[in-house]
Image (cartoon, rainbow, N blue to C red):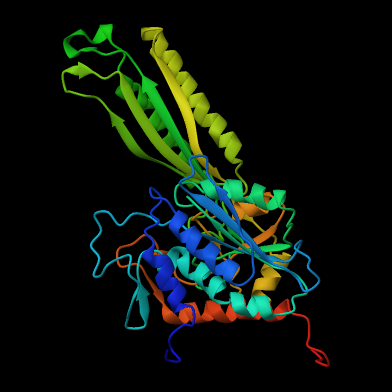
Amino acid sequence: MSDSTPASLPWIERLVAFDTTSRNSNLELIDAVADELRGHGLEPHVFPDDEGRKANLVVTVPAADGSRSGGVMLSGHTDVVPVDDQEWSSDPFRAQIRDGRLYGRGTCDMKAFSAVAISLLPRMVSARLREPIHLALSYDEEVGCVGGARIVKQIADLGLAPSACIVGEPTNMAVVRAHKSINLVRVTFTGVAAHSSLTPQGVNAVEHAARFVTRVRDMADAWREHGPFDDAYPVPYTTSSVNVVSGGIATNTVPDRCVVELEYRSIAAVDPAEVLDRIRGFAQQAQEAMRRENPAAHVDVEVPAQVPGLDADPDSPAAALAVGLGALDDGGKVTYGTEAGQFAGSGIETVVCGPGDIAQAHAPDEYLELEQVQACERFVAALVEHLSLPAEGEVRA
């Protein structure tokens, strides 16, 4: 292995080789990591989901005095987005190095961070830690941080109470203190079918849905024009967009069903619960209009996922720790969401910091610069050193 080859490469290759697209199980990956942990004398906690097809994993490298509470949590998710209909230059589930870049699905988002932590287990275990180091691996982050909502409760149930958490999503090894919330909403309009020559006998679900969509757009336009604003974000206001609409069966049939799927991403100054109340209000008004045509009509609102935003204090302990370990301190905020908001919501000081550029995530030929992997290795190694007790006779500045 050359000096330019990251020490964590074997584990990155192993993790990428598991096709953990969110629709698939992640158990093979979890089992492989669990076996490695046991080989180092650690006993992981594996938490299956309700169907037993996926699992979260939490493990602790205890402090020298045996303590498992406190310390620092390193967090990564195991699932990746699909490669369907994308044109790749190589097998997406076989990591390959080309021109200083490591290609493969999940290299950037975000298996490399987890692989670095796993590859440094021997150093963690052999160190005399004054505080423990925890590793958390979740499932289904890409479809609404489903595993993240559970893993924060599982960590609390284990009594681990980390004092800081670093979520290793791609930030080019810069500290991200804030991101917007993510909220996914599905609204189903149920009307009454009829022949299109007899429209008064039907309730057109598509047309009523269209009026609802324009109200959502009006709400988004108001944020764009009037704020509130937070200029630290690339898009400095709360956004909303209707992204999927499906309804109707034929051009000569009044449609009795239309499903509208939308999302909104809020800055800290906008309460996502209040936005959801407004959307429910729009749906209620649509239902009332539909029922004036036929009492059988109705509108149903579902919330498949809500991921809280992150808004850490500029001088939070987690941010100071990450900067002290060598992370870049640009103070930026990002529009994409992570599990960091869930960790912060559970009372753990949390920031986002990991290797890679978010622009490469989810794309065909997803890649990670090798120098980013090496920077992450130095970062985690510095964490181990920071949490280690000095050797006998050693004096640290």
Answer with the quarter of the image where residue 40 lies.
bottom right
Residue 200 in the image, given as x and y percentages of width and height: 26, 7
Q: Quadrant of the C terminus?
A: bottom right
Horizontal arrangement in the rendering, residue 203 relative to residue 25 (left or right): left
Q: With respect to residue 370, does 247 lie above or below?
A: above
Q: Quadrant of the N terminus?
A: bottom left
Residue at (45% x, 92% y) in the render: 3
Q: With respect to residue 114, does 326 lie above or below?
A: below
Residue at (45% x, 54% y) in the render: 26
Residue at (52% x, 67% y) in the render: 114
Horizontal arrangement in the rendering, residue 86 relative to residue 11 (left or right): left
Q: With respect to residue 123, does 239 lie above or below?
A: above
Q: Is residue 65 visible?
A: yes
Closer to the camera in the image, 349 or 159: 159
Closer to the camera in the image, 125 or 193: 125
Horizontal arrangement in the rendering, residue 134 relative to residue 306 (left or right): right
